[in-house]
Image: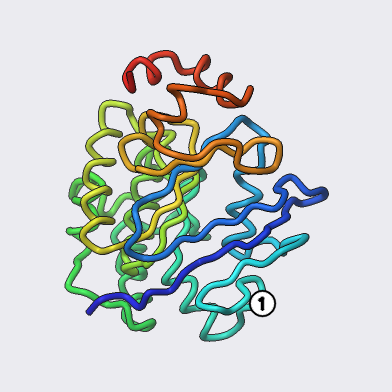
Amino acid sequence: MPHPQTTLSARDLWAGESSDVVRGVSLDLTPGQSPVGLIGPMGSGKSSLLFAMLGLTKPRGGTVTWGGSTVHRLRGSRKKQFGAAVRRVSQNGIPVADRRSTASRELTRALTTARRTGRSSSTTVEDLMDLVLLGPQHDSRPISTLSGGEQQRLALALALATRPEILVLDEPLSAVDPAMRGEIARLLSSVVEDDGIAVLLATHDLELVERLCPTVHVLADGTFVASGSMRDILAAPEHPAVRDLAEAAPRAVQRFR
């Protein structure tokens, strides 16, 4: 069964905890569209944008809606539906309270949540573990004993367990070994394409963005200062923030030429 086409939409969004770090940004994430990358210098507002789009903070101006409903006002069953359809993976790893819990237990719980919200599938715990290159030896280990990279990979598997319509990824593989990062990116790319999952990827890893995202936005000075493919953005960096990104990652720039 295809997912309902439900767009997560920011319109003229102003956001920030104590001031307007994000100023007048508009962005749509619709299931079935190609993944979108979000890059920019530290403090440019990437996290503020993601938090507002996820309803974790209230916009200081503008709107964020999901299927026409204001995200930060969602309550009850509608909020649960949003939580299953729009999944976040952060660099902090796994959002579970009991660190003694195991990967198998948490993935089983996530698949149960998927069934209760009408998003069940034939996917198994083993399928999800394989997707993020975690072997059977990780099944029964307490989450507290997993490395940072293993926890990030498990967090990605947990997000995919509910067959989401939209993935919001915030430095999702920053702790994963670089040699493994490319293979996970390849597997993830295949899943999001096959299932029509919209992706917003915020990261400093330009190569990961280039692997996953045909469209990239550079956030600086509170707004998008460049948009397009990674290759085109870095080929002619006009804004100082884009030039700084290019200078900080010469190997990535060389790869795109």
Left/right of residue 38 with respect to residue 182 in the rendered view: right
Quadrant in which residue 3 is drawn: bottom left
What residue lies at 35% left-to-right and 78% top-to-bottom?
4
* Spot occupied by residue 18 in the image (x, y as percentages of width and height): 82, 50
Q: Quadrant of the C terminus?
A: top left
Task: Please give the name of the residue rendered at 57% of the width and 33% of the height, measured from the top-left corner.
Answer: 40
Q: Residues within 10 Å of mark 1 (few under 14, many from 20)?
A: few
Q: Secondary structure at mark 1?
A: helix
Q: How many marks?
A: 1
Q: Taking 205 as reference, is 193 above or below it?
A: below
Residue 220 at what x, y percent from top left? 65, 35
Report x, y in % for residue 16: 74, 51
Looking at numbered disc 1 in the image, what kind of residue is underneath it?
A: Arg
The colour mode here is rainbow
Q: Where does label 1 land, which residue?
A: 73
Near-viewer residue (139 or 159): 159
Q: Quadrant of residue 52?
A: bottom right
Q: Residue at x 49, y 31 (%)?
A: 204
Residue 66 picture location, percent across and down: 53, 73
Q: Is residue 104 above or below residue 185?
A: below
| Residue at the image position 31 percent from the left and 71 percent from the top | 111
Please tell me which residue lies in front, 137 or 133.
Answer: 133
- Left/right placement of residue 180 relative to residue 52 reads left
The answer to whether residue 225 is left or right of residue 199 is right
Q: Where's the N terminus, which quadrant?
A: bottom left
Q: Is residue 155 left or right of residue 98?
A: left
Q: Residue furthest right?
A: 18
Up the image or down, 113 lies above or below 134; here it is: below
